[in-house]
Every structure is written in structure tokens, then in C-alpha cells.
Image (spheres, helix red, strand yellow):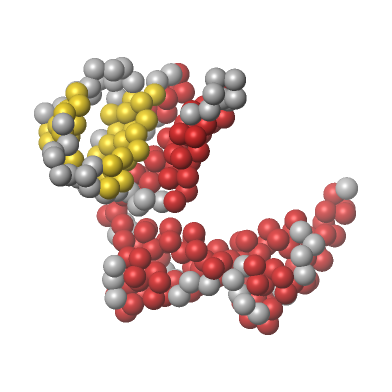
Amino acid sequence: MEFKTGVPGYLLRLQTEGTCKVKLNEREFQLEKGDLLLTNPEDMFELIVEDGDNSGDYHLLCEGDWIDAWWRRSEKPSVSTIDLDENIMAIWRCMILEDRRSVSEKNDEILHYLVQTLCLSLERAAMETKSMSSRPYTVTRMMRYIEENAITGIKVEDVAKHAGLSVSRSAHLFKSSVGKTMIEYAHEIKLAVAIDFLKHTTYTLEHIAEDCGFGSYSYFHRVFKKHYGISPGDYRSSTKHKTMTLI
């Protein structure tokens, strides 16, 4: 099966399963799961899906002033490998569902902002791949996994399995690239969530400790004070005082 360009606009295509080939401006690429294809109206490309490839993808063809400006502001890699981030997939699914609504229920403004969010998210993911020289892509994958799952109480073994590495190898690679252990990085994510809870909710400290994945308040208290030099309770009191002063 072959698909040839002929429609003006920008194509964003993410390979989600199987494989296919693409001939882009006289260059040929083999696209596999996680490969992102970005083309502009001046590109000439041919998409080839062989029988048995079981190729699956999410794609978007769009045009307009915003997308023109977005494309011009930085160099975009034609083909890059990104992590199939659940946040990106969720944006794409929301966009598809919104577009399928009836004419009377469809909200073009929501679609507009979803497209912008998708473009910016894909651009960041592609740029992270491009900067692999300073940080291995495997480490980026581990960081994203920790960010998405930190408050669920993940273990180093979970991160290593996600990266397809041994525990010792993944731990060494992460520490040498990020400058901190996986546990320390997970603590930073948990503490950021805890700070929001302390500032904007009336949850008990025990509730916050549990919801942020610390398990017990005593452990939450110890990690929080080591990081910020103040207890969670004292931090909450200080932020409330500042809010009252501003009012």
C-alpha cells in the first residue's frame, strides 16, 4: 500500500505499532514504533506499507498561521524517535474525540489549543532525542517514567525494566547522567506535588504523605526537612501567613 503527498499542510505522524517505509525528499527511512515523522508543505514524501507490516499510527495534517510560525521558529527533525509518552497519546486521543463530535457540539477553540499543545509536546520530545549527545535517550525515558509514576511508589527495579536494562546498569547510567539517584529524583517529583498540596489544600499531613507516595508521615517529614530545611507543618504555616499578609 502506498500513500503519496499531494495535500498542502504539515504532517505530524507517530508510528505506534508495526513498521513502514517512507521516502522523504529522495531519502528512505524505515519507521518503527516510536518514530515521529514531521513534514512541511514543501516536502515530497511517499509512505509505503508492505503486506504484513501491521503498521499503526496517529497522524495529523494541519495548516494555518500558528502552525506556520511554529514550524519556522526552530529546525524540526524530519524523523526522530520519541518515547510513546502517555501524556502525548492522551492529547492525541482527546483531539480525535473532539473532532468526531457533531457539528453542533464540536468546539473549534478546544481543537485549536489541543493542536497547539500536541505540536509543542512533540517538538519537545523530538528535541530531547536530538540532545542525546549530552544525555542518553534511555536516561530520558527513565526520567519520564519516574515523573509519571513517582507518587505510585515505584521501585528502581520498575524503572530498570521499563528501560530494558539491569538494575545495576540503569542505576549507574542514571546517576552518571543526571547527577542524582533515581530515588532522589523521584523524591523531587513527590515533594513538588506535596508543596502544591500544602499550599492549596487543607489535607492533613498524613493524607499528603500517603497521596504523594511517601507511605508514612514520618518518612515524608524526614525527606521534606532534609530537602527544604523545614518541616511540612512549618512550611504550611509560613505559606498561609504570607497569603494572609498579601490579602
Residue 120 in view of the camera: no
User: Residue 67, relative to residue 200: is it above or below?
Assistant: above
Q: Which residue is painted at 35% across and 71% down in the image?
A: 160
Residue 93 in view of the camera: yes
Q: Position of residue 236 (x, y in %)?
A: 77, 65
Question: Left of 109 or right of it: where is 29?
Answer: left
Q: Position of residue 46 (x, y in %)?
A: 17, 28
Q: Which residue is painted at 34% across and 34% down in the image?
A: 59
- How many numbered discs, if any? 0
Question: Left of 77 or right of it: where is 187?
Answer: right
Q: Position of residue 64 (x, y in %)?
A: 43, 19
Q: Position of residue 17 (x, y in %)?
A: 27, 47
Q: Which residue is painted at 64% across and 67% down in the image?
A: 211
- Report which quarter residue 242 is drawn in: bottom right
User: Residue 51, relative to residue 178: is it above or below?
Assistant: above
- Report which quarter residue 244 is drawn in: bottom right
User: Residue 8, relative to residue 134: is it above or below?
Assistant: above
Q: Which residue is painted at 37% across and 58% down in the image?
A: 140
Which quarter of the rendering shows the N terminus? top left
Front-most of 94 and 173? 94
Question: Left of 204 or right of it: where is 46?
Answer: left
Question: Left of 35 or right of it: where is 219?
Answer: right
Q: Residue furthest bottom?
A: 218
